[in-house]
Image: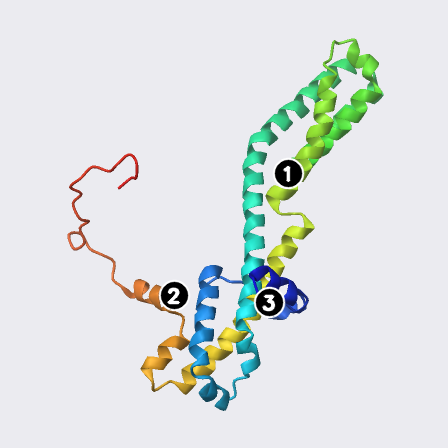
Amino acid sequence: MNSAECYQQRLDVIRAIPDDRIKTPISMPVKVYIQEAENLHSWATDDKDQLIAKGLDWGPVADLPIRCGALKEASARWAEERFTREEAAKQWAIESPLAYELRNELIQEFRFAFRKDAKLSSKVSTIADGSGHADMLQDLNDLAVLGRAHADLLAKTNFDMTLLDQAAQKSFDLAALLADATGERADSSETKRIRDQAYTYVKEVVDEVYAIGQFVFRDNERRLKGYHSNFLRQVRIKKAQPAPTDGTSTPPTQTTQPSAANGK
């Protein structure tokens, strides 16, 4: 069964995990956590009888490969969405300044074209009030509507009417882009929530196996090592190492020039 199939098979169960049980992965990358969970499943299988004798429910342990598969898929979906959001943020950074320039240009043009009409001038001032991205996008749409309704006055100033179409289109397109960039779409938060629920679905089993395995093999160093996270062990070791002092750690001298082709 591939990860997508695992995900679909367990999606309802994962979604049912309540808020007060949901954990967010913060101690290690999810892909590393998944690999360690899969390794733990294999390691614990060799100690099955001893673990069960101390109260471990083997059902969830036997289920770990499917749970890990579901987490792989949930994590991949969240990663893809995050990448999309980052790309949208980059695109927004390029396009939003142009949208602000268009908005400001239209306001100036409208104020000039409608200067003799107090009611229209007031409408332009109302549109010009406010700040922020959402306000700017709404302004573009409002200006397009107002301009089309009074095209005769704009024509007298040789106003470029295509700017109205541009304003309306930018308002529509950039609203979607902003939602992607900020993650404000409903499916965005839902995707992350499912990833965290899937992580919890695995973690609850892993934590229980670790706890019982560490007790059962507390006097057996050879088996005990399999009931600790190797990743976190390496992190602790690295943190415990003293920082190198001047003259104690010198990088090897490079005797050849890097290759332009491979950087080595």
The residue pinned by badge 2 equals 231
Give the CA distance from mark 1 to mark 3: 30 Å
Mark 1 falls on what kind of element?
helix
Give the CA distance from mark 1 to mark 2: 38 Å
Give the CA distance from mark 3 to mark 2: 22 Å
Question: What is the x, y in percent for residue 145?
Answer: 80, 26
Q: At label 1, which amino acid type do we have?
A: Leu
Asked whether, in this view, residue 172 is left or right of residue 117, the answer is left
Task: Determine which quarter of the picture holds residue 262.
Answer: top left
Asked whether, in this view, residue 37 is left or right of residue 241, the answer is right
Question: What is the x, y in percent for residue 223?
Answer: 36, 81
Q: At label 3, which amino acid type do we have?
A: Ile
Task: Determine whether 252 is above or below 198 in the image.
Answer: above
Question: What is the x, y in percent for residue 35?
Answer: 45, 65
Query: Is residue 53 visible to us here?
Result: yes
Between residue 230 and residue 147, name the one nearer to us. 230
Residue 233 is marked as: none
Asked whether, in this view, residue 67 is left or right of residue 151, the answer is left
The residue pinned by badge 1 equals 177
